[in-house]
Amino acid sequence: MAGSQARPHAFLRSLSQQVNDFEPDFPSRGDLQRLGIQTFEVPFDPNENGALKFDPCFFKPHPEKLLEKYPIPPRVQKEYEDHLTIPHIRTIQDYIDENRTEYPPGVAPILENLLSIDRAGYLMESEAYSQADGIERVIDAHMSTPRRGPSHHFTLERLRNQAYWSPDHKAGDPPLMEGYEKPKTWRVVNHYRYTDRPLKPHSVMSCISNVCPTETNPGLTTHELRAIVCTILRRVNHKPFRTCRTHPILVLSFLGDQQGRVIQASYNGKGMILQYSQIWSFADAEKAPVELFLRYRLSEPVGGTYTLSIR
């Protein structure tokens, strides 16, 4: 039995190292298949309140129209407005228009013409990581903002029995972030486990990546892969779930250009399956899929994960 339990851990450690060695931002599907990772883009089904067609499915999104059923009172809306509003990414022309007294008429909207203080602000706003982080913060603010509901001091967080998961770091544990000093910057944030009994290995997390998918490169990024593999490697070593056959994690992934997608990762000891949605844009506040991401943040854990018997 000891040998059978060691193999999955060895696979994940090897996988973590190999993913860490990837140089391109967008590994090919063939690259991932050779590592034992299967990837599938799944469609969005607008019926039944809208859901992604994961198969197998381990996370069922909250069914209710959350923003309509649990509105934010006007006085609270005003107080929390800055946190709930999707940031506007200013262009070089915006900086010039906002400070006309400092720029001559007809100045060309190019980076070299910006004042040093405006240039620093523009570079920060145009950075992929900052754009991704800004959207994640909006989703998190919606979760914690007081709303009208069934109880006093009600927030969306109360709709699901979840607890923040932050295990103690041990020597040899994989990182849950790579900073700006690294070629690929990413970070795992707001990782939650389910507290209902019996305990399940499912968890939900957010990932912020310093990368911008494009029409020609819409696939999973190395940043997302590193975040997922490192997190699962920690989860399989968490005592309550060491004997579980399947370890599912739902990822709310936030990317540059104010984009995001939902990823369901599942690991079964022999390989990993990553099912991911299309990329959605949050740039247009009227069309941004804020509610969809909140519904998946409050997913119900479903599907069999089967605990192995130890004898």
Image (cartoon, grey):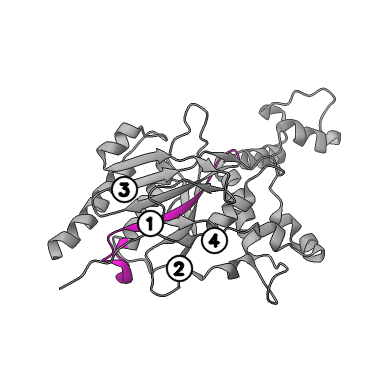
Marks 4 and 1 sit apart, C-alpha to C-alpha, by: 15 Å
Mark earlier in primary sequence (2, 1): 2
Task: Give percent across and percent down for residue 299.
Answer: 51, 59
Residue 174 in the image: x percent, y percent?
A: 34, 56
- Disc 1 designates what residue? 248
Between the C-alphas of marks 2 and 3, the distance is 21 Å
The secondary element bearing badge 1 is classed as strand
Name which quarter of the figure residue 233 lies in. bottom left
Q: Give the residue number, with chain letter if any, for mark 2.
A: 194
Residue, disc 4: 298
Residue type at mark 2: give it. Answer: Tyr
Name the residue at 35% across, 56% down: 232
Counting from the top left corner in percent of width and height, residue 209 is at: 49, 45
Identify the element where label 2 is drawn: strand
User: Sequence order check: which comes first, mark 4 or mark 1?
Assistant: 1
Specify start and end residues of the magenta stretch as a single range. 236-257
Q: Is residue 135 above or below residue 27?
A: below
Q: CA distance from mark 3 to mark 4?
A: 23 Å
3D distance between C-alphas at marks 2 and 4: 10 Å
Q: Considering the image in quadrants, where does the C terminus appear?
A: bottom left
Marks 4,1: beta carbons within 8 A: no
Point out the tag, 1 or 3, that comes first from the N-terminus: 1
N-terminal label among 2 and 4: 2
Quadrant (top left, top right, bottom left, bottom right) of the N terminus: bottom left
- Left or right placement of residue 90 versus residue 99 in this view: left
Which three-letter amino acid code belongs to the residue tagged 3?
Met
Mark 3 lies on residue? 272
